Every structure is written in C-alpha cells, then in structure tokens.
Image: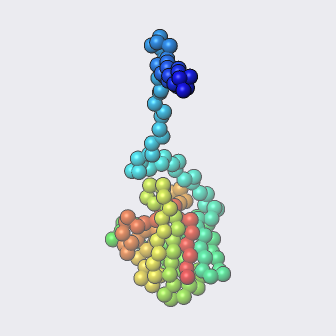
C-alpha cells in the first residue's frame, strides 16, 4: 500500500512539474486564430458593366409556347416606338412584341433580367392586356434592353433584359 501511495505522489509531482514548464518564462502562448467574418449584407458585389451589343446581336429571347422570336438590336430599334411621358421613356410597347408571336388576349408576361445595380436577378410578371401600351422595351446606346413603363413602379423596372415569355 505504501508503494502505491509513493507512486501516486510521484506521478502527481511529475504532472505538476510538466504543467509548470521549465521555469524559463519563455513558454509559448496560444495565439488567437483568425476567424472569417461575413461580408456586410448591404455591400453589393463589384460588377463589371455588361458588354455592349452590336446591332446584329440578339437583343432578347422571346417565347410563347412553341414559338420563339429573337430580335436583333437593330430589329428592336426598327419597331414602332411609344413615348411614355409619365415614365419619361420611349421604347417598343410590349403589345408589339406579343403581336410578333400572335399572343392571345389575357396572356401572362414574364420578363427576366437584372436589378438596377445589375447585381441581382430581377423578374417582372404581369397580364399583357394591362401593360400592353404602358410598358416598353427601351434599347440603350450599348444595345442593352430595359423593361420600363408608366404602369410599373421604377423600383420594379428590369434592366439588361435577357428573356421574355408569354403564357
């Protein structure tokens, strides 16, 4: 029994000595580990502006069922233009695009593009009859298309439009 107590006492001294180090005062200390932090949710990513489109490039893809229409930038510029003084824009009425595909009355229109800062996808959906003459596709100097209109709040305008579908 005495041998066991001596062994336990010796083991305890060994552990105590190991925990205290050699007494030189130069023991390594734990360094804080850098932790990644999330980016501020209000910070938008930095994006390059979209590349300009040539007059012969497809401006937008349009579908209605099994029909499709792929007007070039020049084609869109050649269509009749509507001036929406209430919105301060001039462009091709959605009705003109629908007529190209013989879209039925009451069709639902979905427009896909980007937000005003081009950082996020944006979609707009409406009934063609309600927006046929008050929503337009505006082609800018770089050949990019924007859905704008007096019947659509400016916060809902779709920039850099890529596709339009009629259902």
* Image coords of residue 7 (percent x, y): 55, 23
Is residue 7 something one can see in this rendering?
no
- Is any part of residue 127 visible from this angle? yes
Q: Residue furthest left?
A: 86
Residue 71 location in percent, x, y?
A: 61, 70
Residue depicted at 44% across the width and 55% down the height: 117
Residue 95, position as x, y percentages in the image? 49, 80
Residue at horizontal 44 percent and vertical 50 percent from the top:
44
Residue 102 or residue 28, whichever sits in front:
28
Q: Quadrant of residue 63?
A: bottom right
Question: Residue 75 vs residue 134: left or right?
Answer: right
Residue 98 horizontal/vertical position (percent): 54, 80
Left or right of 43: which side holds 79? right
- Which colouring convention does the figure follow? rainbow
- Rendered position, 75 above or below 13: below
Left or right of 9 on screen, residue 102? right
Q: Residue furthest right?
A: 66
Closer to the camera, 18 or 151? 18
Most extreme residue toward the bottom is 105
Name the residue rendered at 57%, 52% in the picture. 51
Rendered residue at 48%/48% (across/down): 45
Location of residue 14 with respect to 90 vertically, above or below: above
In which quadrant of the rendered view does residue 65 lie? Answer: bottom right
In the depicted structure, whether residue 54 falls above or below residue 21: below
Q: Looking at the picture, does residue 69 appear above or below residue 143? A: below
- Figure quadrant of the N terminus: top right
Please count the marks in the image: 0
- Which quadrant, please, contains the C terminus? bottom right
């Amino acid at each position: 029994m005495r041998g066991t107590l001596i062994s336990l006492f010796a083991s305890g001294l060994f552990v105590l000595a190991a925990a205290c180090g050699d007494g030189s005062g130069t023991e390594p200390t734990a360094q804080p580990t850098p932790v990644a932090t999330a980016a501020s949710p209000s910070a938008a990513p930095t994006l390059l502006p979209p590349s300009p489109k040539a007059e012969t490039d497809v401006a937008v893809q349009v579908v209605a069922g099994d029909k499709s229409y792929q007007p070039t930038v020049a084609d869109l510029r050649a269509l009749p233009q509507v001036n929406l003084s209430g919105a301060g824009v001039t462009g091709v009425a959605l009705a003109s695009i629908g007529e190209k595909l013989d879209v039925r009355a009451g069709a639902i229109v979905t427009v896909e593009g980007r937000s005003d800062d081009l950082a996020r996808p944006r979609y707009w959906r409406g009934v063609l009859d309600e927006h046929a003459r008050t929503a337009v596709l505006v082609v800018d100097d770089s050949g990019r298309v924007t859905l704008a209109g007096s019947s659509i709040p400016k916060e809902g305008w779709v920039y850099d439009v890529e596709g339009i579908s009629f259902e």
